[in-house]
Amino acid sequence: MLHWATGGVMALVVAACHRAPATAPLAPAAPLPTAVRQTVLDSVRRVLDQAIADGAFPGAYAVIGTRDGIVAEYGAGRLDSADATRPTSRTVWDLASLTKVVNTTSAMLQLVGSGRVALDSPVVQYLPEWKAPGAARVTVRHLLSHNAGLPAWRALYKEAATPDEAMSLVLATPLDTVPGVRFLYSDLGFILLGRLVERVSGEPLEGYGPRHVFGPAGMQETRFLPPASWRARTAPTEQDPWRQRKLRGEVHDENGARLGGVAGHAGLFSTAHDLARFARLYLNGGTLDGVRVFEAATVASFTRVQDTTVSRRALGWETPTGRNSAGQHLSAVAFGHTGFTGTSLWMDPSRNLFVLLLTNRVNPTRQNLRIGAVRAGLADAVSAVLAGAPR
């Protein structure tokens, strides 16, 4: 049972005329007082409604929950200027870089946990075709920690005409510093990790997650290359200057598109319903509804800070720094990640809490940068209501 703080929370209550949309709850949480649930919901509503008024994004859906279920969920705004549909728990969102943790890091967690991949082995042991200058010194741990010495990015979509050409460019990109000495968030590193997952598992990347992670976790609406039947409930993203059209149901990330819509760094689509289950899976140490998806010890090792002399990154995951989207009040053992399109997920095991925010902040343009304050503001607003969970 959670313990709750009530002092000062009435400042977060908004006018009673603002009602949450009538959607079915994602899953029941442990019994909590109705007044507490309402106060949590009011705090979420206040943040999202203000963000909509400020033009931070057209639409959003937030879920606050625990390992047991959902405490509050709320949809705000509309899917697009031309689509007044209010977001729900079944709205489909382009996850952007949440792909790195939901798909690729989770796959790596399983492969490491089963002994098929060793974190401190050279990546070239699994990908001998990676012959770029400096590659032989890079370990799997380096890639997962974003300290492999790789550049952050390369305009593959401009340099290549096919997925194979794009991957060849990734494999040929040289390191620009020594592995293990500098943190630099790198899409290229996670593109390589996606290829490593395919090589070790013998399965295509788009098939691994549904078979080994999402399916067992009851996540039926999480996948690469979403079908056309999902388009009407998918939140549109940008009026893309490269493709000269508004994107809806196709990956926003240009390099992800050039790689065929399936890559280790971007391309996954999902719903709040599924990602709430994903968060509960991690908070439960890899088990959900009696099904074990991950080994608890491996979850703990992947979500722990790796080397504080370089950064406060875990394996794949971010941890709170006081300056990132975790806000100011999540505990030191929290972990999370963001996506360029306006998505974020934070989990705090010590407080038995997750904060999920899904938006399409790049609609109609990626130049809208208000999302940063909203992410941290939501985490802080929820933390202002909730006291710490049992440790």
Image: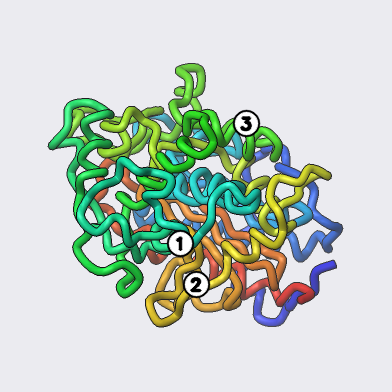
Amino acid beneath label 3 = Arg
Secondary element type, mark 1: helix
Say which quadrant the N terminus sits in: bottom right
What residue sits right under mark 1 in the picture?
Answer: 141
Q: Nearer the viewer, residue 314 or 327?
A: 314
Q: Which mark sits nearer the N-terminus, 3 or 1?
A: 1
**Residue drawn at (63%, 36%), measured in percent from left and top?**
212
State whether residue 158 appears in this view: yes
Q: Which mark sits nearer the N-terminus, 3 or 2?
A: 3
What residue sits right under mark 2 in the picture?
Answer: 306
Tell me the crowding category of disc 2: few under 14, some 14 to 19, or many 20 or more residues within 10 angstroms, Cα based. some
Q: Position of residue 35 (x, y in %)?
A: 78, 64
Occupied quadrant, residue 379: bottom right
In the rendered image of this protein, does residue 231 appear above or below residue 103? above
Mark-to-mark CA distance, 2 and 1:
9 Å
Side of 122 where 215 appears, left or right: right
Q: Are marks 2 and 1 in contact (CB under 8 Å)?
A: yes
Occupied quadrant, residue 243: top left
Amino acid beneath label 1 = Arg
Q: Position of residue 157 (x, y in %)?
A: 19, 36
Q: Position of residue 153 (x, y in %)?
A: 23, 52
Q: Are marks 3 and 2 in contact (CB under 8 Å)?
A: no
What residue sits right under mark 3 in the picture?
Answer: 211
Q: Nearer the viewer, mark 2 or mark 1?
A: 1
State whether residue 58 appears in this view: no
**Residue drawn at (70%, 36%), measured in percent from left and top?**
216
Q: Position of residue 188 (x, y in %)?
A: 30, 49
Tell me the crowding category of disc 1: few under 14, some 14 to 19, or many 20 or more residues within 10 angstroms, Cα based. many
